[in-house]
Amino acid sequence: MLLAKERKTLGAILLDTTVVGDRNSPALYAAKELRYYLDRMTAASFAIEADDGSKPGIRLTEVRNDLGTDGFTIDTEGDRIVITGGVRGVIYGAYEFLETLGCRFFTHNCEKIPTKPELEIPCLHEKKIPMVEYREHNYADVTQNARFSVKCRFNGASHRIPAHMGGYMPYAWFVHTFERMVPTSVYGETHPEYFSLVDGKRVTTGGGRTQLCLTNPEVLEICINSVREALKQRPDARLISISQNDWMGNCQCDACRAMDEKEGSPSGTLLNFVNAIAERLEPEFPDVIFDTLAYQYTRPVPKTVRARKNVCVRLCSIESCFSHPFETCDDESRCVKHPDGTVTNFITDLRNWGKICNRMYIWDYTTCFSHYPTPHPNWRVLQPNVQSMVKNNVKGIFEQACGASRGNVDFNELRLYMISKLLWDPYCDIEAHKREFMEYFYGAAAEPLMEYLDLLCDTVEKENIHVGFNDQPLHRFLHEDMLDKYDALFDRAVAAVAGDPLRLWRVEKNRLSIRWIRLKRKAMLQNIYDPEEINQFFSDWRAYNLSRIDEWCNLETTHRALLDGLWRGTEYWEHWTSEEPEIF
């Protein structure tokens, strides 16, 4: 099928008559995106027209059927390509069609659009429904660029995608919500019994640095009312999180302890509490999913309590090693302890939750949060880990990454691209996607840079180095002799693109990872402080318009910590959540 030739279109982009003028229609948005990219490819000017049934071209139809919200079909029907999909699926189908023609959407400002003055369309018959219903990643490139987020097919709450672009899955509240439900500022002094008993004392101060007594019936009633009011204020919300604060301190009162021991895990006490709220509020909010966490001390499954049909359990991998796949990692130090003293590893918990959950989501980790620039050797575990998730009944995945407001280094653009492909299709050819990205984004520097990424992974695999989400740069793969090898590969990359200013800029940006590790290790391990080297690093960091190096500190605090011989700026504070505002 020929769609354009010699700057002339041989078909139009076709919509239902009622959609052509509807600015809120996702199908119209999909049509406009198709028009823009087809125009770029052909230098022809495609029209968006109402379909009268007789015109050739590309027909876009939004439907509500077995495709769900995100699924789509693409079919050749005579002199037409028909793209049919759900409210987001019709848009995803349009992007899939463009990718079939050779378009690639690597970052929000780096796209590969082929020039095809004679645009021949192959015969297409595709149907795609994602295995993962909820797909989220928090790198700045997508959270701050909704259009790119849609191209990546993310639909989580952090992306705030407008309705005409397909929308997203909105939360009324998102994780660590006990403090919102029963504020210590309101109840701490008057009702200490509402809060967790830890080492014989009720912990009632510190904002989110406490937990609730989940067997107290008054706490349950307060929480039901709090959740009800939150849902009334967010009638669009599909989910609301009823989940522990980000603090290790579950209640040890007699009633809570007894239930924890009976269920073999504090998750039983928590899930029983969440079930009660979900059951009470279901008649008022029949379409809402009540979400909770299986996180740290609640990670292991309970013996008998099961999630209600309208409850979702979000399992968190925070203790895990991220340099080896969940299924093969042998690091026993990362297990979680049960009340009876036995331990369990993450893959066991994942499998166990998968057996008892109708809906399970995952919170996974994809960077080093204490030192964002640190080379994070997880390139070979991303796909097997996502595959392990979907094999065990996981329906939603959040891959938490560097949350710095202006992005970061350590090849995060590549990691984002790979994650977007994996969350859409866990069984895709991820190596082909990786190579396509590297060859276009880094040009002639791609080969030595891929050797660098391989060397990182080869080293942690060969030496069985286990890497967490928050480690200091002390691992063997970050020792000085390894940094020398990495720098040599970056030297080759720089030489390869010496005449290509854009790609040279990208290469040197990622070399900031190696420069930061050298600075930090010199200061902390050798007491070496070179004022010129330190000043130049921070000058260059700012020149690349980058902000945080540490998840919880602004750049000035991280700089001061380096000079004071501290691993992190959070060491200045009583608790890591006492963060300073990011001022630049």
Image (spheres, rainbow, N blue to C red):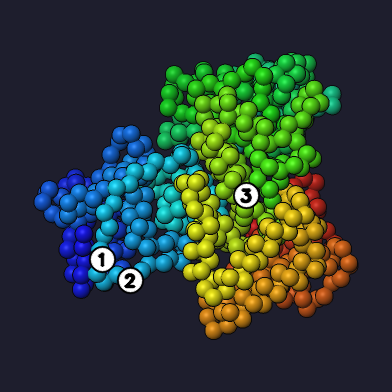
Disc marking residue 381: 3
**Mark 3 and mark 1: span between their CA atoms?**
39 Å
User: Which label's residue is closer to the chain start, 2 or 3?
Assistant: 2
Helix or strand or loop: what does disc 1 sit on? strand
Disc marking residue 261: none
User: Which image quadrant: the C terminus?
Assistant: bottom right
Q: Are marks 1 and 2 in contact (CB under 8 Å)?
A: no
Q: Amino acid at mark 3?
A: Val
Mark 2 nearby-residue class (10 Å; few <14, some 14–19, many ≥20)? some
| Residue 509 as seen in the image, left or right of residue 15 | right
Helix or strand or loop: what does disc 3 sit on? loop
Q: Amino acid at mark 1?
A: Leu
Name the residue rendered at 42%, 35% in the picture. Answer: 236
Mark 1 nearby-residue class (10 Å; few <14, some 14–19, many ≥20)? many
Helix or strand or loop: what does disc 2 sit on? loop
**Mark 1 and mark 2: span between their CA atoms?**
9 Å
Residue 68 x, y percent position in the rendering: 36, 36
- Residue bearing the label numbered 2: 115
Quadrant in which residue 504 is drawn: bottom right
Name the residue rendered at 60%, 44% in the picture. Answer: 385
User: Which label's residue is closer to the chain start, 3 or 1?
Assistant: 1
- Residue bearing the label numbered 1: 119
Q: Residue furthest front?
A: 462
Quadrant in which residue 286 is drawn: top left
